[in-house]
Image (tube, grey):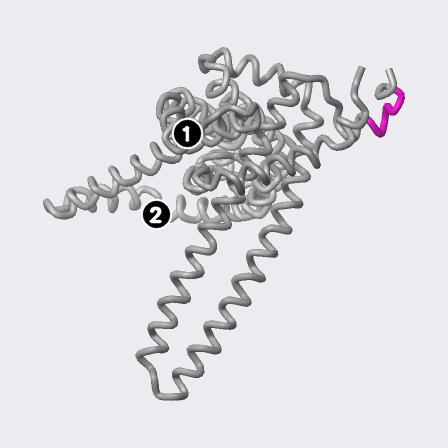
Amino acid sequence: MIDNNKNMSIYRAIFRNSLKITWRNKYLWFFGIFAAFVSNIGEFNLAWEKIPQVNENASFLSVLRSSYEQGIIGGFWTNLTELFTSLNFMGWLLMIVLLLLILFLIWLSIVSQAGIFASAYKIFKKKKTDFSETFRTGRQNFWKVLWLNILFKLFVLVLWIVLILPLVILYLSQGAPGIQSLFVVLSFVILLPVTIILSFIIKYAILFVVNKGMTVKESLKEAWYIFKHNWLISVEMAIILFFLSIIFVIAVFLAIVILSAIFSILMGIFSTASFVGISYVVFTIAVIVLICLILWLGAMWSTFVHSCWAILFIRISEGQIMSKIARLLHPSSEEE
C-alpha cells in the first residue's frame, strides 16, 4: 500500500526539508563550495553543458586532422618536452607547489562531497552532527569516495575511447566526412545517456558508502539495484532540479546585474567628481562583493542539491514510493 498524500508531496517535502537543512546548518556551506567541484549534482545540467561540446568536438575533428597532416601534433610533444627540460629550480618549485595545491583541492573536494552527503543524511534522520563531525566523516571515507569518482571518470573515458577513438583514427587517416555526423549521433544516442545513468549510480554508491559503511564493490552493486528499481523517480528529480537550477541562475544573474549597476553608478559619481582614487576603491570592493556573492549562493545551492539527493536516497531505500509519472499512468496503484 502506498500513502497517497505522502507520494503527492514527495518532491515538495524533499525540497522543503533540503531548504531547512541548508539554511539551519550554515557550516555545510563551506563543504558545499568544494563538493560542487567533484559532484555530479545536476545530471541534466551535465547534459546541457555537453550538448554544445558535441558539436564543438565534431568540428574539432577537422582541426585535429589538419594538425595531424601538418605535423603539429608531433611538434606539440616536442615543445612540451623542451619546456620541461628548460625549467630551472624556481620553475620546478613553482610546478611542485601548484601540483600540491591541486592535490589539496582534490582532497578537500572529495572530503566535502562525502561529508555533506553524510551530514544531510544524519540531519534528516534527526541525528546530531556539526562541522568537525562532517569533516571527520568525509576524511574517513576519502579513499572510497575518491575511487568511486575515479571509476565514474574511467567508465566515461573508456566509453569514449571505445566508441570515439576508432572514428578519430579513421578520420585522421582517411578524412571521411560522414564520420563527423556519426560522432554526433553516437554522442547523443549512447554517450550522454550512459554518462547520466552512471552519474546516478555513482551518487547513490557514495551515499551507501558514507551512510551505510559499505565497500566500493558493495555500494556499486546496491546503487545499481536501487537505480534499476527507481530510475524514473531519479530522472524526475534530476529534471526538476535542472529547471530549479535555471531559475537559480537567472536570479543570481539579476542580482549581479543590479549590484554591478549600483557600483557602476557610484564609480561614475566619484570619477566625475575627480575622486579617481575612490572610484578604484569602489571597483575593488565591487569585485570582492560579487565574488563573495557568487561563492555564497553557489555554496548554498550545492548544499541544497546534495541534501535533496540524500533525502531522496532515504525515501527510496527505506520506503516504497512511486514516481509522479507512474502515479499519473497507474492511478489505481495508489489505492491498493
Horizontal side of residue 77 vs 332, given as left or right: left
Residue 105 magenta-drawn?
no
- Estimate how packed mark 1 is, as few (under 14), some (14 to 19) or many (20 or more) residues with alpha carbons within 10 Å: many
Quarter that holds the N terminus = top right
The overriding secondary structure of the stretch rendered in magenta is helix
Residue 271 place in picture, x, y as percent: 39, 84
The residue singled out by tag 2 in the image is: 72
Among numbered discs 2 and 1, the one appearing first in the sequence? 2
The amino acid at mark 1 is Thr
Quarter that holds the C terminus = top right
The residue singled out by tag 1 in the image is: 134
Q: What range is drawn magenta here?
A: 327-332
Horizontal side of residue 37 vs 253, given as left or right: left
Q: Is residue 44 visible?
A: yes
The amino acid at mark 2 is Ile
**Distance from the alpha carbon under mark 2 to that under mark 1:** 49 Å
Residue 316 position (above or below residue 292):
above
